[in-house]
Image: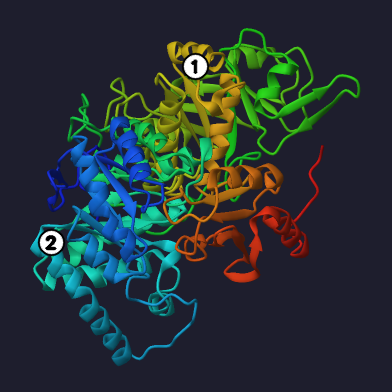
Amino acid sequence: MQLYCNSLTEYNRLPTKEVKIGNLLLGNLHPIRIQTMTTTDTLNTLATVEQTIRCIEAGAEMVRITAPSIKEAENLQNIKAELHKRGYTIPLIADIHFTPNAAEMAARIIEKVRINPGNYIDKKKFQQIEYTNAEYVEEIERIRNRFTPLIKICKEYGTAMRIGTNHGSLSDRIMSRYGDTPMGMVESAMEFLRIARDENYHNIVLSMKASNPQVMVQAYRLLINKMFEEFQECYALHLGVTEAGDGEDGRVKSAAGIGTLLEDGIGDTIRVSLTEDPEFEIPVCKDLVKRYSGTTQISTIAAIPKIETITYSPFNFHKRATFAINNIGKNQVPVVVADLSKINTITPSTLESIGYQYNAVTDKWHIGDTAADYIFTGHQVLNFALPGTLKVICYPAAWALAEDKSKYFPIFDANGFIEAEAKSNELNFVMLDCFSDATTINDFTYLDELANDTSVVLCLSSERKNAMQAVRRMFIELQQRAIKNPVILIIDSNAATADEHLIHYATEAGALLLDGFGDGVCFGMKQNSYQLLQHNSQSSTGRTYLQNQTTEQFINNTAFSILQATRTRISKTEYISCPSCGRTLFELQETTAKIRNVTNHLKGLKIAIMGCIVNGPGEMADADFGYVGSGVGKITLYKGKEIMKRNIDSSIAVTELINLLKESGAWVEPIN
């Protein structure tokens, strides 16, 4: 099988064709570049300039500005001139969707244009059309004739181009032949790339964005393979998860998708699409990129054994086959293990931070949708009765003291388990540090001692810098040996801030979960990081989503957010929310907060909140319901891709959305 990256066992950047964007070089192993997009009205020159400057000062190396019509494209000249007057010369990018004449104008003014092949020239009317081969070729020629003038302008003016495919805006023609698939996304971009190559134009960046990180990751991998197969080279890649949302969920979803690809050396520039002011996207980008900055290869003392045969498909999601032990493995959703071992005395109130509320009057527990399945207590045996579904993992000495062996289970290292005289008949957790320096790298004999013991859940972690690759290599070893024990992913973080912890967990766990590896997660922190986060959560320096949370609550919420983002365990409402731009027809951040406030109890429902017709309904391909700006102060409501209520006044639109949910049988009353 052709790999989509240089190595699956070490970090190694994928070389791509160099792109010149103004005075900035991208691709060809240059540093990973950071960018964002303004949310102001492009015709408001000063507002756009001021916001662009805030983005630059936050660290953006490129800034994208929407140009939905030729008027906005023409005003890019004024924006650029004012920025230069103030001493800012970073490259600007025009964001184009439906209007070739706006792209052709913008290409004469600024350094880069972005076109979406799904709706630039091609049609998007949600129609199923059967094309003969001759008709299909005729459509390609129509695109060639309309696209070539832009290419020639870009060549003449030295303008770069991004061919940016979005999962939700594939054309009717592509959808009719390929369906709503990653391969359809790839072919949509390749059609335009082939035309550009025929014109000897190569100053190109490509992107494959989706709101579903699983689709996004598969599409980029397929695109890389397709380019190498067809051209024997790879063009520069812009990474992003579109419509990621806001707050913790938006950051987690972005990190899971972008981080998975960065781990394999893929990506030359990134943008994190949050429903927040654009300058707040930049710190997240920085946290993602700094894991890889200044190096083309993460050094290790001893190399991880090479992979001779890949045992899974990186282009299609299939969960690794395992047997079930208790509620872990086989077809069950991944479990969440909360690490409470740093708390000196665990009490019933401690469990509130991981989803369990105790009512002393009724002597009953309320269990939330994001309640951890297990807790790790280290050396502690608890002195109170546990909620019915919660179970405890502890060290063997503590387990031996526990009276209720149906609630308490021991955790060993590999040698400890093999040598132990006392073990649980039901469930034992066994830790493996994958390819640690103390391990004989090519010696897997210890696996044979554990293999297919129907009481053993393996807990995989790694102390290496390239920890994700080490754990992935162990999964491949398990598959090669037909070892089907379920696996918990153990990931410790040594970061300094909440954002950095989010990035670390979402990148390392997300990359494995998106490939079908892992039957549960357990996130922990080194002692100094734990103490620092405890302090920050109680001070004004903590991030908004960390305020009034304990560290354990933050970690537990993060675990469930990562499982949700990777579509491996759905525990809450999902919001597919665009990041706003100059096209937005209502106050997106405020509206998103309103909708979230009244619908966040609808577990498993996907609601898209889109600022304009460009981002919806097309971009909300994955959503059950959509709330889309259709005019100033006007909203259109969708069920799937079908319009249900058109041009509603925005003052009553949230109420009408609730009514639509009720009419569709998707509403349940919240529990107070």
Q: Nearer the viewer, residue 481 or 543?
A: 543
Q: Is residue 210 left or right of residue 456?
A: left
Which amino acid lies under the numbered mark 2 shown in the image of this protein?
His
Q: How far across and down, in percent of the image, does residue 442 sit? A: 27, 33
Residue sitting at 19 percent across and 65 percent down? 229
Query: Quadrant of residue 374 in the image?
Result: top right
Q: Amino acid at mark 1?
A: Leu
**Inter-mark Cα distance, 1 to 2:** 46 Å
- Compared across the picture, whether 639 is left or right of 53 comes to right
Q: Residue 132: x, y in percent? A: 35, 91
Q: Badge 1 is on which residue?
A: 533
Tell me if mark 2 has few (under 14), some (14-19) or many (20+) residues whose alpha carbon lies within 10 angstroms of its own: some
Q: Secondary structure at mark 2?
A: loop
Residue 268 seen from this side: yes
Q: Residue furthest right?
A: 362
Circle 2 residue: 202
Mark 1 and mark 2 lie on one chain; the one further toward the N terminus is: 2
Name the secondary structure under disc 1.
helix
User: Which quadrant: the N terminus?
Assistant: bottom left
